Image (cartoon, grey):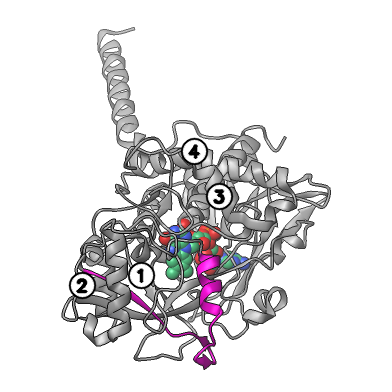
Amino acid sequence: MSRTRALTLIVLSLLGIFAAYHYNRSTMATTPKLIPTSALAKNGAIVVGSGLAGLSAASQLIAANIPVRLLERNAKPGGNSIKASSGINGAPTPFQPGPPDTEFYADTVKSTGHAMSTAREHREKLIGTLTNSSASAVTWLTTTHGIDLSKVAQLGGHSRARTHRGAGGTPPGFAIVSTLLKSLKASPLFELKTSCTVNRLLLSGASITGVEYTCSSPEAESTTSELHGPVIVTTGGFAGDDTGLLATHRPDLANFPSTNDPAPGSTHLLTSVGAQLLDMSSVQVHPTGFVDPATPLSPLKFLAAEVLRGEGGILLHDGERFFNELDTREKVTAAILKNDPVEEKPKQWDVLLVLDEGVYEAAKSHIDFYIFKGLVRKTTIGDLGDKALATISEYADVVAGKHEDKLGRTAFADWELLEPKADSIVYVGRVTPVVHFTMGGVVISEKAEVLDAQGVPIEGVWAAGEVTGGVHGGNRLGGSSLLECVVFGRNAGERVVEYIKNEGK
Ligand SMILES: Cc1cc2nc3c(=O)[nH]c(=O)nc-3n(C[C@H](O)[C@H](O)[C@H](O)COP(=O)(O)OP(=O)(O)OC[C@H]3O[C@@H](n4cnc5c(N)ncnc54)[C@H](O)[C@@H]3O)c2cc1C
């Protein structure tokens, strides 16, 4: 070899090493370390629905370098998850005050109510998975994704403060959904298709092998196509499906207002391939949806976040407190429904949510927003009448420790008005029960496998989030829905990673 040729080879190989080093460095953050080779791994997974359950599943897959195609029927991603305003449960976490919280499992079992008398063992496994994974779910959001969840409140039905949200003004649903979406969109392995509705799952023998979906666009004719790969169904609940699933399973709730936009439920995708349904008649009617004075008869209501009662707020009917505001939603709602509705279409009750300056300061970002929307007004106790003044004075004495609450409330958080007078400032809004959340859905295992009538996993499909049933039984604890999305969404993602790595075995 001539000297010139040898020198050229040395320079070329040095350039090669230099280029490879720089290529690896510049692509390390965004591209997979391992390029999958099998067809299954190359196509990756299909996720249906872009709420928190879908985004959690997708994040888990992308973290393992598996491509994800996420199909969403709405023009914008985020589902109902983006509206979540109170927070996500976790226990024990470093953000919780006091000694380590070991009561989450027991509180959840208690909250499920009579549901525990059927399929007890199955439910215990789901609740165990939910609550035992709750601390790591919060850590995943805060440490891995950098989301602020440092403020913790005690919501109705919880024996401890364990519902986490950010200390700033951003509502938790928006903070979590937007952060996960941003991170997913940064990956070249992630593809989001909006305005695309999945019509059915594709079945080959006993296995799910993909989906058929239709995309619509205002400019072009809609197109129907297929995608192939394992499927994770995260299509949310049916609280907004008042003429469909809700009318079938709870006709008595037909005229109630709701916090969910009207849209059909999607459990049929799974029942048509053998999935079973559980708890379909267990529908959560949230005790406090705001009645907007500008549009009092609108069927779509804005949720009066649980945190308002959690931070110390009280409920008055005809000037009097009537129930422990921190009891479960089911029980608070039942207490309101004992009275006659004041409107029939939609069916509405006349309940006042009352907050003092302490509650206002603790939940300022929420309350300022409600004031801005015209749902809450700042006024004086005198404006609410003498009965209300007497009631608030009695509550203030309870908060001050002068006597026990006759309704059994023991936590008062940030309520600080201890000597109420007619001219004391309060914040008030009219609230009424609203259809809010559907506990029922398809039966899954703790690994998010979709189970058939024999309790056997249907191959090639997983499900998580509000589309599933069994985790909450008869009543969901506030903050546990976002949690189920993260826990079972990530479980589904992990199983699909295994499934793909084992080439479908
Ligand atoms: C106002 C409000 C406040 C809430 N606050 C809290 C809270 O503070 N804490 C808490 O834990 N929970 C809260 N919840 C409940 C919680 O937000 C939801 O139950 C949960 O986020 C559901 O998440 P998901 O991913 O299962 O479904 P969703 O977030 O509803 O997402 C499902 C997605 O699937 C899409 N989809 C449906 N069918 C199809 C189909 N066939 N093809 C393609 N896409 C489809 C839908 O368009 C939707 O975008 C609140 C709910 C509401 C309405």
Mark 1 or mark 2: which comes first in sequence?
1
Closer to the camera: disc 3 or disc 2?
2
| Residue type indicated by callout 1 | Ile
Instruction: First in sequence, mark 4 or 2: give its number.
Output: 4
Write down the quadrant of residue 136 in the picture. top left
Earlier residue among tags 4 and 3: 4
Judging by the rendered image, the residue that carries numbered circle 3 is 108
Earlier sequence position, callout 1 versus callout 4: 4
Query: Looking at the image, is 320 positioned above or below residue 357?
Result: below
Contact (Cβ within 8 Å) of mark 4 with mark 3: no
Question: Which span is picked out in magenta?
Answer: 329-356
- Secondary structure, mark 3, is helix
Mark 1 secondary-structure assignment: strand
10 Å crowding of disc 3: few (<14), some (14-19), many (20+): many
Query: Residue beneath label 4, please?
Result: 65
Tell me the quadrant of the picture where the N terminus can be found. Answer: top left
Report the mark closest to the observer, 1 or 3.
1
